[in-house]
Image (cartoon, helix red, strand yellow):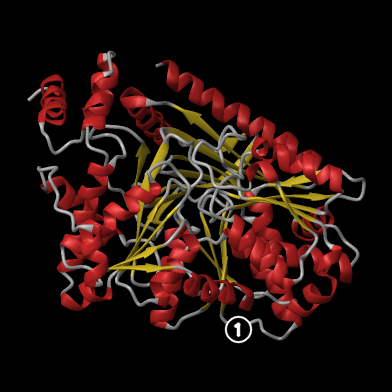
Amino acid sequence: MDLEREVQKKFKLWMENDYFDVETRQELLKISDPQEIEDRFYTDLKFGTGGMRGVLGAGTNRMNRYLIRKVSQALADTIREEGQEACDRGVVISFDSRRFSAEFALETALVLGANGIKAYLFDDLRPTPELSFAVRYLNAIAGVNITASHNPKEYNGFKVYWEDGGQLSPKQADQIAAKMAKEESWEINLLDKNQALESGMLQMIGQEIDRAYEAEVKKTLFNVELSQTAGKELKIVYTPLHGTGGGPVQRVLRELGFTSLWIVPEQEMPDPEFPTVITPNPEDPSAFTLALQTAKKLEADLVLATDPDGDRLGAYAKDRRGNYHRFSGNQIGVILEYYILSQRKRLGKLPERGVLVKTVASTDLGDIIAADFGVKTINVLVGFKYIGEKIKEMEREGWGTYLFGFEESHGYLAGTYARDKDGIQASALLAEAALYYLQKEGKTLPEVLEGIFHRYGTYLDEQIAILLAGKEGKERISAVIDRLRRKKPSFLGGIELERIEDFQTGLRWKIRDKKEEKTGLPQENALRFSFRGGGFVMVRPSGTEPKIRFYFCIRGQSREKAEQILARVKDEVFAWVDDLLKE
């Protein structure tokens, strides 16, 4: 059957079957553009390695209650194959501040209930890391978070965790994806909400989990006494960007002693429209516009922002001249890494077999710092789920002690109480680090970063994403990466390359040796060009958006030299891309 006929068949089903509600049919009826109809029905939104995410709306290629029901049924089928004990242990469900998040969370619970699987549903929105913690705390078989993280307001998603509190393994993700693909019918049974509550198949949860989670966050800190006595001296401005972080970040910071804390009033309350920002993403400097205005009025020392589901942290800090310095995700990562390792060493708590885990797209500076403290570095594929898998592996096999993990996209976790990045914990750690360095060493955080550069070398990083939307854009992204894959340069921007890693083939090409070896990592459509002496360029398609992402990590003898090299490398890489896009 050709594409046009398949699209019309699906469209007709959604328009004529009474299972789909009136609002859904009315939404589809208003669409006059045939290309819009095609984009909504040319494919079914796929379940990926950690879940699924897409634009809200009616259609098989959109996030809606019918897709939520279908993926929930596939999850239920997977759990039922684990046996009755797994069904009894249940699934924890949380949600963020996006449109339909609460409704989708309830739909998930009621589908699970219809399959004899207990659901623990949070009574209000909660951050992603608390969901990861709650799965472990309640000994549940799985967890579901209804979130699209920092994506634009048009998106929502369905993210699945397994019993260790980490995201799904590829095997489990494949099981759910296969069950979704096999199920042709869209008509899924749901339990009645009142019946689910009365029978105990649906249990509401809330404050008990909050208290337990926040207590675990506090246990990962190093200078609680200093925060209690001097925390009020550090002025902090914080914004949850209309998301889930507002309550827990405020409670944790204030209870620690950071009472000189101001919340950006326009962004304090959850709002699915995210009216004050273009994108609610702490990676984006424009998301800090209001926070910086507040900080300048108050002469704040530190400015923090978490994304809508509370798992990412962005930050600015005031320097000696009163200017606010923006930290990239990598820079926050190395500041936290250096603080954690140096504090552990100072307190005699640095284990012999300590391990840092970070992604291959994150700065090489992390490896250098870890080596200086005698800590092993493990680099994993992009996605915090791989960091969580390494924590699980270490615990199961007993070969190392996990200390800290980070990814350049502003994700951090110290300790093992959760298995996903935690913006609430990172906020507390960064505030404590800022206070410690100011009180004990007389340094601002920008000075701390410059000290790290002076000790280990200057590393500058940047990430650039190119949007190529729709079916055609997806094909162009694949074509560009495939053509880059065939390039085997020895230099980039005038700097010699040491190796080229193709994570799709699982092979590493060592340029001088003209030798091929295995990367030892799972397959992923990504390329990494590593410079001799440190630094790299990496390219991969986004896992959640129609974008191709380029990651730059450049080492230089000084900031000025690194900036010059970065400019040359970017010019050459994007000249390649421009040529490829013209083909």
Looking at the picture, how far across and down is residue 6, in whole percent? 12, 26
User: Looking at this view, is 48 or 435 the one in front?
Assistant: 435
User: Looking at this view, is 499 or 412 the one in front?
Assistant: 412
Residue 369 appears in the figure: no
Q: Is residue 202 left or right of residue 80?
A: right
Q: Amino acid at mark 1?
A: Glu
Write the residue at 38% across / 43% down.
100
> Which residue, as the protein is rendered here, is positioned at the far bottom?
348
> Which residue, as the protein is rendered here, is positioned at the far left?
1
Q: Secondary structure at mark 1?
A: loop
Q: Is residue 437 left or right of residue 472?
A: right
Where, by quadrant of the figure, is residue 562 drawn? Answer: top right
The residue carrying mark 1 is 352
Q: Is residue 64 left or right of residue 443?
A: left
| Quarter of the image where the C terminus is located | top left
Write the residue at 20% across / 35% down.
21
Write the residue at 23% across / 20% down.
29
Looking at the picture, how far across and down is residue 47, in whole percent? 28, 47
Q: How many marks?
A: 1
Looking at the picture, how far across and down is residue 472, in whole percent? 33, 23
| Quarter of the image where the N terminus is located | top left
Looking at the picture, how far across and down is residue 480, in whole percent? 41, 29
Write the residue at 80% across / 46% down.
295
Residue 351 appears in the figure: yes
Measured along the vertical axis of the image, is residue 284 above or below residue 244?
above
Q: Residues within 10 Å of mark 1 (few under 14, many from 20)?
A: few
User: Looking at this view, is 100 or 429 the one in front?
Assistant: 100
Q: Is residue 111 left or right of residue 303?
A: left
User: Looking at this view, is 554 or 333 the one in front?
Assistant: 333
Where, by quadrant of the figure, is residue 484 drawn? Answer: top left
Measured along the vertical axis of the image, is residue 170 above or below residue 254?
above
Where, by quadrant of the figure, is residue 42 drawn? Answer: top left
